[in-house]
Amino acid sequence: MKILSLECVDSTQTYVLEGLKSGRLHAPVAVVASEQTRGRGSRDNHWISLKGNLFFSFAVARDTLPDDLKLESSSIYFSMLLKEVLLAQGSHVWLKWPNDFYLEEQKIGGTITTLHNDIVICGIGLNMAAAPQKSKTLDVSIKKSDILTPYFTLLKSSPSWKQIFSK
């Protein structure tokens, strides 16, 4: 997967979608940003994107996903993959159905997934360094690369829906 690192974008999700539409980007591709000015959340909510947190979106062809993964379950699938990576790093993160990352009772991140033609676009935001009021940051101090490298490795290995949810 080609990974583009950008300093600041309006939204990694929007950047990937517009890049695919224009032909400038092709799946598989990921975009990681240090800062977002108009991050997107589910149901068209605004994601508060404080500098230093983790913001990334990626696009993969639908036919590269596990055969047993239904499209409507892709957000929870991508979230479960990240949860596995974070747990392996010592975090106590848990998922609130279907796409929010929590520590104790406070949200620390979320996942949004959309479809463009036969390309699945997933965006993930995770509070690592700073959090808005009534939110928390990740409970382990790790570099973004310590999340992204194993995440994209796990995604590439394409574990089945059954494998992910049997844990």
Image (tube, helix red, strand yellow):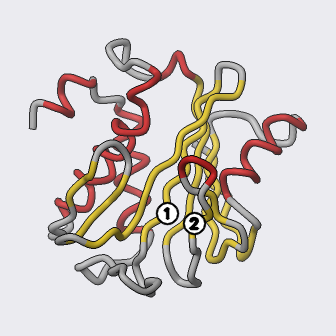
Foreground residue among 158 and 128: 128
Amino acid type, label 1: Gly
Identify the residue at horizontal 17%, vertical 60% (top origin).
88
Q: x and y percent of residue 17 in the render?
A: 75, 42
Circles 2 and 1: CB atoms closer than 8 Å? yes
Q: Which residue is mark 2?
A: 47
Q: Which residue is mark 1?
A: 125
Q: x and y percent of residue 143 in the render?
A: 39, 77
Q: How many marks?
A: 2
Q: Quadrant of residue 165?
A: top left
Q: Which mark is residue 95?
A: none
Identify the residue at horizontal 56%, vertical 59% (top origin).
56
Sooner in the amino-acid sequence: mark 2 or mark 1: 2
Q: Quadrant of the N terminus?
A: top right
Q: Residues within 10 Å of mark 1 (few under 14, many from 20)?
A: many
Query: How far is the residue under mark 2 from the one under mark 1?
Result: 8 Å
**Relative to 77, is 118 on the left or the right?**
right
Q: Residues within 10 Å of mark 2 (few under 14, many from 20)?
A: some
Vertical position of residue 88 compared to residue 69: above or below:
below
Foreground residue among 153 and 113: 113
Q: Quadrant of residue 45?
A: bottom right
Identify the residue at horizontal 78%, vertical 41% (top origin).
25
Amino acid type, label 2: Trp
Q: Quadrant of the C terminus?
A: top left
Identify the residue at horizontal 82%, vertical 44% (top origin).
18
